[in-house]
């Protein structure tokens, strides 16, 4: 079948993207689903910094590539061997299609699935196949999803079934921003009630971490960002304090507010200076959790003496250390119960044709979560 999709042919084109148009809206050929795969009509797809990192070249990926990885839609066709989902089911798509059989999956850590990591790096589905092409030229899949498109063929393992009454433009956010941000708090950090928290970087993932910290019962949530607008937004979501990272002594400000540092600091900006700030603001015996994805060549320095003498923990969090088949339904249930107001993160709705302008807004820090809505 023919589908309309946003295709990246070259990374690193200069902003503004409204002018350079790194994403070309093209008609692609989409093969039917193979064994263990599904055809999904995409109804909503969120713009994420991980997509932007591919566009600007800080996360190298094979091109040409159809972008988009945070999405929700409706199943239109079921491939051979799929027995637990059917045509008409509503699904959230997740960007690590865990196999369930490798070492990390068997250990209960599906976010670290080895076959999924290999397929995602290669630009294929979990099967190793590519179902997209342009004039017989293969087109790579982003993280097994490629959701900036009217339809996508995905592995069964990329889908989480949801109730059909949840608006799909909200459901999409649970596939990345909420899963990663809330998961980093409850799964990676295992935040305890009464602990103090700093969240550095207030994009969709960072603000989801603010919601997660509030959900987990943090006594103090210090929001940290370069944007006063984002800091004000975080305060409305439940942050108790706000610190602008441009301050001459942002670390000192945080440590004074928390009394010698926070118990847990989350870095969600994807930059080394943000991670260094978060680490410096963490108290003795505390944990620094990073879910940011800077350029692979970037490095940070830290003192092993401090790490040992202060019993510090520095920990990575990928997909919020989540098990999506378990955690997406739980987080949706918390949203329905009014304990996880994810709807407040959705600030812009746009059409696929306006996606380059949407990434300009994301690059400039305007709004929180933008969602491409398909009729």
Image (spheres, rainbow, N blue to C red):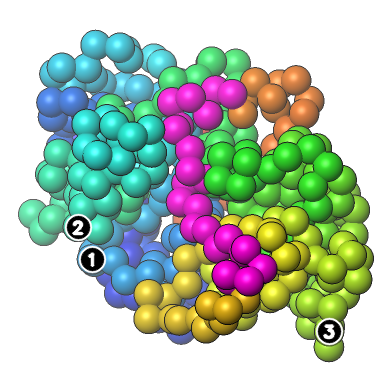
Magenta extent: 307-330
Circle nearer the N terminus (3, 1): 1
Which label lies toward us, 3 or 1?
A: 3
Mark 2 lies on a secondary structure that is helix
In the shown orientation, is residue 105 left or right of residue 220? Answer: left
Neighbours of disc 2 within 10 Å: few (<14), some (14-19), many (20+): some
Label 3 to label 1, Cα distance in Å?
A: 41 Å
Q: Which residue lies furthest to the bottom in this view?
A: 248
Say whether residue 327 is magenta.
Answer: yes
Image disc number at residue 62: 1
Which residue position is annotated with label 2? 122
Picture quadrant where residue 139 is located: bottom left
Say whether residue 160 is magenta.
Answer: no
In the shown orientation, is residue 302 left or right of residue 60? Answer: right
Circle nearer the N terminus (2, 3): 2
Neighbours of disc 3 within 10 Å: few (<14), some (14-19), many (20+): few
Q: Is label 2 in contact with label 1 (beta carbons under 8 Å)?
A: yes
In the shown orientation, is residue 180 left or right of residue 75? Answer: right
Residue 18 position (above or below residue 112): below
């Amino acid at each position: 079948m023919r589908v309309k999709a946003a295709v990246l042919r070259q990374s690193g084109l200069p902003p503004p993207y409204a002018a350079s148009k790194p994403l070309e809206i093209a008609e692609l050929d989409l093969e039917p689903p193979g064994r263990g795969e599904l055809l999904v009509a995409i109804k909503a797809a969120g713009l994420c910094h991980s997509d932007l990192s591919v566009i600007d070249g800080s996360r190298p990926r094979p091109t040409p590539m159809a972008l988009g990885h945070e999405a929700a839609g409706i199943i239109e066709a079921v491939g051979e061997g799929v027995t637990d989902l059917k045509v008409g089911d509503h699904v959230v798509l997740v960007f690590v299609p865990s196999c369930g059989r490798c070492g990390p999956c068997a250990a209960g850590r599906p976010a670290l699935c080895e076959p999924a990591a290999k397929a995602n790096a290669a630009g294929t589905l979990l099967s190793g196949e590519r179902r997209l092409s342009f004039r017989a030229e293969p087109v790579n899949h982003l993280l097994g999803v490629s959701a900036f498109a009217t339809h996508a063929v995905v592995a069964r393992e990329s889908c989480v079934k949801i109730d059909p009454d949840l608006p799909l433009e909200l459901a999409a956010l649970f596939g990345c921003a909420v899963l990663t941000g809330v998961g980093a708090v409850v799964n990676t950090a295992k935040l305890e009630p009464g602990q103090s928290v700093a969240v550095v970087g207030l994009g969709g993932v960072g603000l989801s971490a603010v919601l997660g910290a509030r959900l987990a019962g943090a006594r103090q949530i210090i929001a940290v960002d370069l944007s006063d607008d984002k800091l004000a937004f975080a305060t409305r979501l439940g942050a108790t304090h706000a610190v602008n990272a441009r301050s001459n002594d942002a670390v000192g400000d945080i440590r004074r507010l928390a009394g010698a540092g926070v118990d847990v600091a989350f870095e969600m900006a994807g930059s080394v200076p943000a991670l260094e700030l978060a680490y410096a603001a963490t108290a003795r015996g505390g944990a620094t959790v990073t879910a940011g994805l800077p350029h692979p060549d970037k490095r940070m320095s830290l003192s092993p003496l401090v790490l040992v003498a202060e019993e510090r923990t520095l920990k990575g969090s990928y997909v919020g250390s989540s098990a999506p088949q378990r955690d997406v339904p739980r987080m949706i249930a918390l949203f329905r119960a009014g304990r996880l107001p994810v709807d407040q993160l959705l600030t812009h709705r746009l059409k696929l044709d306006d996606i380059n302008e949407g990434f300009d807004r994301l690059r400039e820090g305007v709004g929180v979560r933008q969602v491409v809505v398909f009729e």
